[in-house]
Image (cartoon, helix red, strand yellow):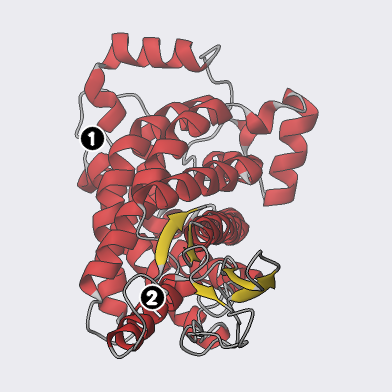
């Protein structure tokens, strides 16, 4: 099978393939770029400590390492690892299923279908990822009072209840639904430009992912600022919904407050989505290729033993053409026998499902017209290797 040309037709309807590839891609995406995510969270704080007021991404990262230790930018990563694996497994498997369902019988460039599939996938993703985001962002803040992941979970639960982990869920959905819709539509659009044949193309996947992440991140930054506010500020009796967050951001930062940390967010999302799509497409390709190879090698064609015998005195032989349609393979080899040379079958090489179907169809028609007796007819058998 030519996996480069048949990449989009590989047996990727397997949900396990999508879930495995998605889980690995999600963990890699968040872990590799986690230090920039920590910087973004700090820069979106609307009332930071004087020691945590940064003028740029580079300064923030430098001061975090210098003043708080080299491991400070990766504090809280364990929450992402626990949440991103299952969240992205459901995310990509749901997206692939919905995309295939909505685009059946339509053209490839169905951007509305891609956007709709992304919306549905986001509902499942955020249901798992939102509590992880709350814990992660609280651990990322300057002078965080929590000693560890478990300590943060226990203290938040005791002081604010279970709803604290989902306080920003509607805000996150409000942000992520347009984010993922824009993300998937942009990714598929760039793929149509850079990878029209939809082959496995690491460069095209990386470029498409980076552009899609940058566009979606820039458009949805105001909602991300509101989400960070809700995740990091303990409830104090006032409203805690999206409207309250929008008003608070405007009160503390004015119109420019909605775009705090936009550069850090774009710098984080571009490589993150590039890594995510590259890893996802790579593992999807590898898992699908292995499944395709196993499927191709699982069936072999075998002809019954001693189907044709050469008469030693006359030299006459009964011979049947056993070649499958389109093949030039001679399925017989000659060996010595007591009564003369004996024609014995060779095992055919591995064939794909299409080749198998063609071979069976050809021989079915051929044997119907054959003048050979039933005892000597060269019928095909299927055996598992």
Q: Position of residue 221 (x, y in %)?
A: 43, 58
Residue displayed at 51% across by 70% down? 351
Q: On screen, 278 above or below 191?
A: above
The residue labelled by disc 2 is 377
Residue displayed at 30% across by 27% down? 165
Residue displayed at 35% across by 70% down? 375
Q: Position of residue 159 (x, y in %)?
A: 30, 11
- 127 left or right, relative to 23: left
Number of the label disc, if any, that sits on residue 382: none
Q: On screen, 133 above or below 365?
A: above
**How many labels sit on residues?**
2
- Residues marked 2 and 1 touching at CB (< 8 Å): no
User: For numbered disc 1, what is the local secondary structure?
Assistant: loop
User: For numbered disc 2, what is the local secondary structure?
Assistant: loop
Q: On screen, 365 above or below 344?
A: below
- 116 left or right, relative to 271: left
N-terminal of the pair, mark 2 or mark 1, is 1
Work out which residue is located at the far right of the displayed protein and give it: 66
- Within-10-Å neighbours for mark 1: few <14, some 14–19, many 20+: some
Quarter of the image containing the N terminus? bottom right
The residue labelled by disc 1 is 240
- 368 left or right, relative to 14: left
Q: Position of residue 212 (x, y in %)?
A: 49, 69
* Of the pair 279 and 115, the residue shown nearer to us: 279
- Within-10-Å neighbours for mark 2: few <14, some 14–19, many 20+: some
* Of the pair 183 and 92, the residue shown nearer to us: 92
Q: Nearer the viewer, mark 2 or mark 1?
A: 2
Residue displayed at 40% across by 44% down? 89
Q: On screen, 218 above or below 59?
A: below
Q: Is residue 184 visible?
A: yes
Q: Position of residue 328 (x, y in %)?
A: 60, 88
* Of the pair 126 and 295, the residue shown nearer to us: 295
């Amino acid at each position: 099978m030519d996996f480069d040309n048949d990449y989009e037709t590989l047996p990727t309807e397997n949900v396990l393939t999508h879930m495995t590839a998605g889980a690995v891609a999600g963990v890699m995406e968040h872990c590799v770029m986690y230090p920039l995510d920590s910087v973004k969270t700090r820069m979106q704080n609307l009332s930071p400590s004087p020691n945590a007021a940064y003028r740029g991404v580079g300064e923030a990262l430098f001061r975090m390492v210098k003043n708080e230790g080299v491991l400070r930018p990766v504090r809280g990563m364990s929450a992402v690892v626990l949440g991103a694996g299952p969240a992205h497994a459901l995310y990509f498997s749901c997206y692939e299923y919905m995309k295939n369902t909505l685009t059946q019988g339509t053209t490839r460039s169905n951007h509305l279908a891609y956007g709709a599939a992304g919306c549905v996938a986001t509902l499942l993703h955020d249901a798992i990822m939102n509590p992880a985001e709350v814990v992660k962002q609280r651990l990322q803040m300057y002078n965080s009072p929590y000693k560890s992941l478990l300590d943060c979970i226990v203290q938040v639960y005791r002081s604010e209840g279970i709803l604290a982990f989902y306080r920003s869920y509607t805000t996150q959905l409000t942000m992520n639904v347009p984010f993922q819709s824009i993300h998937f539509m942009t990714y598929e659009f760039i793929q149509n430009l850079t990878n029209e044949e939809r082959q496995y193309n690491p460069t095209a996947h990386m470029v498409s992912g980076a552009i899609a992440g940058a566009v979606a991140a820039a458009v949805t930054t105001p909602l991300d600022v509101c989400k960070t506010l809700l995740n990091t500020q303990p409830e104090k009796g006032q409203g805690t919904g999206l409207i309250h967050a929008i008003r608070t951001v405007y009160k503390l930062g004015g119109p420019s407050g909605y775009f705090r940390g936009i550069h850090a967010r774009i710098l984080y999302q571009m490589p993150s989505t590039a890594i995510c799509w590259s890893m996802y497409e790579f593992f999807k390709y590898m898992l699908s290729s292995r499944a395709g190879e196993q499927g191709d090698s699982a069936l072999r064609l075998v002809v019954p033993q001693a189907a044709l015998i050469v008469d030693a005195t006359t030299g006459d032989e009964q011979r049947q053409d056993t070649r499958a349609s389109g093949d030039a393979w001679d399925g017989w080899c000659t060996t010595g026998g007591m009564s003369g040379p004996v024609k014995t079958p060779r095992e055919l090489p591995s064939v794909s499902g299409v080749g198998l179907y063609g071979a069976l169809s050809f021989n079915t028609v051929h044997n119907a017209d054959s003048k050979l007796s039933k005892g000597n007819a060269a019928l095909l058998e299927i055996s598992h290797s």
